[in-house]
Amino acid sequence: MKLRAALTIFTLSASLSAMEMRNEEEVSSLVNSYDKATLTEISNELIKMATQEETSGEFDLATLHYKRALKIRESIGLKSHKSYASILYLSSSAQFQAGYVCEASASAKDASLEFAKHGLVKFQIKAMNDHETYGRVCAQVAMK
């Protein structure tokens, strides 16, 4: 199963596209082709890839991989899982670094709300602080 997930990730990575429609099609195709366990593995691999891309300064690619991981988790019913909140939070940082400051603010706020649902107060506060910071930058960018 891990080999199949790795091959799927490789194929998905080879066909990277910044267009959201293409992203939706790829995720939809995956969801229709694999079981929940394999999709969870694929999502985890996307998160690993995104983390590595962030480390190497590839924030646009990291953002794209986080989005894909989130969409997969949503499609298999894991939106209410605390891991979803963590991915949202990681995504907000990558979005901010990529220059998508308003999206980063929204993601950090959503992460904060999700952390609150799980009683993860420390993370809820950190995400809300980032939401406010990113929101201030978003407002400054909007004024230009």
Image: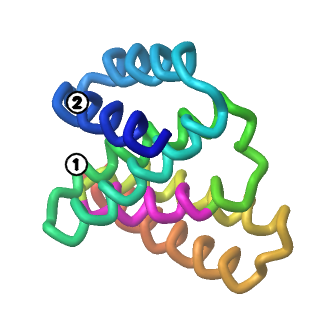
Q: 140 and 78: which one is in front?
A: 78
The verdict on residue 89 being magenta is: yes
Depicted 6 relative to depicted 134: above or below = above
Label 1 belongs to which residue? Answer: 60
The Cα atoms of the two marked residues, 1 and 2, are separated by 8 Å
112 is within the stretch colored magenta: no
Q: Residue at x 44, y 41 (%)?
A: 67
Query: Residue 41: in sight, yes or no?
Result: yes
Residue displayed at 53% across by 63% down: 89
Q: Tell me which colouring the rendered structure shows.
A: rainbow
Dot 2 surroundings within 10 Å: few (below 14), some, or many (20 or more)? few
Q: Horizontal placement of 29 versus 12: left or right?
A: right
Residue 68 image offset from top left, x and y in percent? 43, 37
Give the amino acid at mark 2: Ala
Q: Nearest the camera: 122 or 128?
A: 122
Nearest the camera: 109 or 45? Answer: 45
17 horizontally vs 113: left or right: left
Return the x and y of residue 11 as percentages of the image width and height. 25, 28
Return the x and y of residue 82 as percentages of the image width and height: 72, 61
Please say if the residues under marks 1 and 2 sit with CB atoms less than 8 Å apart.
yes
Specify the segment rendered in magenta: 86-97
Which residue sits at x=38%, y=41%? Answer: 3
- Residue 119, how many percent across, how many down? 85, 74
- Near mark 1 (Cα within 10 A), the count class, few <14, some 14-19 or many ≥20, is many
Q: Residue 18 shows which numbered tag?
A: 2
In this picture, is 45 found above or below 85? above
